[in-house]
Image: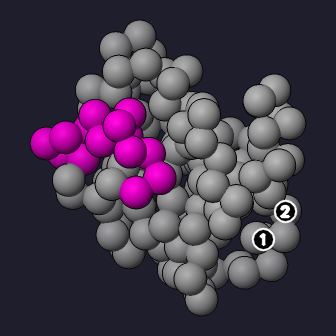
């Protein structure tokens, strides 16, 4: 499994890449493996401020539907439109082409509560 050191992680298996006050968010390699083949992504939150730990969408796999939880409070700026036609990008490339949303972070201090790659590895037993 892949755990990029430059990312931060949540206990709910989302990753976040921060650049200034903006962030890109997706689900981890561990999460996509646990879910199996992803067939649909449902995110309708562009322009909406979503609080830390609130649901910002869902991911549907062959065997289950899972909520997506916001790692930090922020306003959703963009949804990865490539996932509409190719949800399997989350399975094949969860950290690059399979990202879910880009957000403007409202509460930068909330980044301090996220997990490092090593902490996340320990959480999932890798």
| In-front residue for pair 89/42 | 89
In the image, residue 84 above or below residue 21: above
Look at the image and say whether residue 85 sits in the magenta stretch. Answer: yes
Marking on residue 113: 2
The image position of residue 14, as x and y in percent, is 60, 47
Residue at the far bottom: name it: 20
In the image, the segment drawn in magenta is 83-96
Crowd around label 1: few <14 · some 14–19 · many ≥20 (10 Å): few
Residue at image position (53%, 73%) is 23
In the image, residue 38 above or below residue 28: above
Marking on residue 110: 1
The image position of residue 17, as x and y in percent, is 58, 68
The image position of residue 49, as x and y in percent, is 51, 70
Relative placement, left or right, of 50 versus 77 is: right
Find residue 63 and report its image quarter: top left
The answer to whether the residue labelled 1 contacts the one labelled 2, judged by CB atoms less than 8 Å apart, is yes
Residue at the far left: name it: 85
Q: Look at the image and tell me whether residue 57 can be seen.
A: no
Residue at image position (43%, 69%) is 102
Q: Secondary structure at mark 2?
A: helix
Distance from Cα at disc 1 to Cα at disc 2: 6 Å
The image position of residue 69, as x and y in percent, is 59, 47
């Amino acid at each position: 499994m892949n755990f990029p050191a430059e990312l931060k992680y949540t206990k709910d298996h989302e990753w976040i890449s921060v650049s200034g006050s903006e962030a890109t968010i997706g689900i981890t390699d561990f999460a996509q493996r646990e879910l199996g083949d992803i067939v649909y992504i449902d995110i309708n939150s562009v322009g909406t401020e979503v609080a830390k730990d609130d649901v910002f969408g869902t991911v549907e796999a062959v065997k289950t539907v899972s909520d997506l939880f916001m790692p930090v409070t922020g306003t959703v700026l963009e949804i990865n439109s490539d996932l509409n036609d190719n949800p399997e990008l989350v399975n094949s490339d969860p950290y690059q082409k399979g990202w879910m949303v880009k957000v403007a972070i409202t509460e930068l201090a909330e980044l301090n509560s996220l997990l490092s790659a090593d902490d996340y590895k320990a959480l999932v037993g890798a």
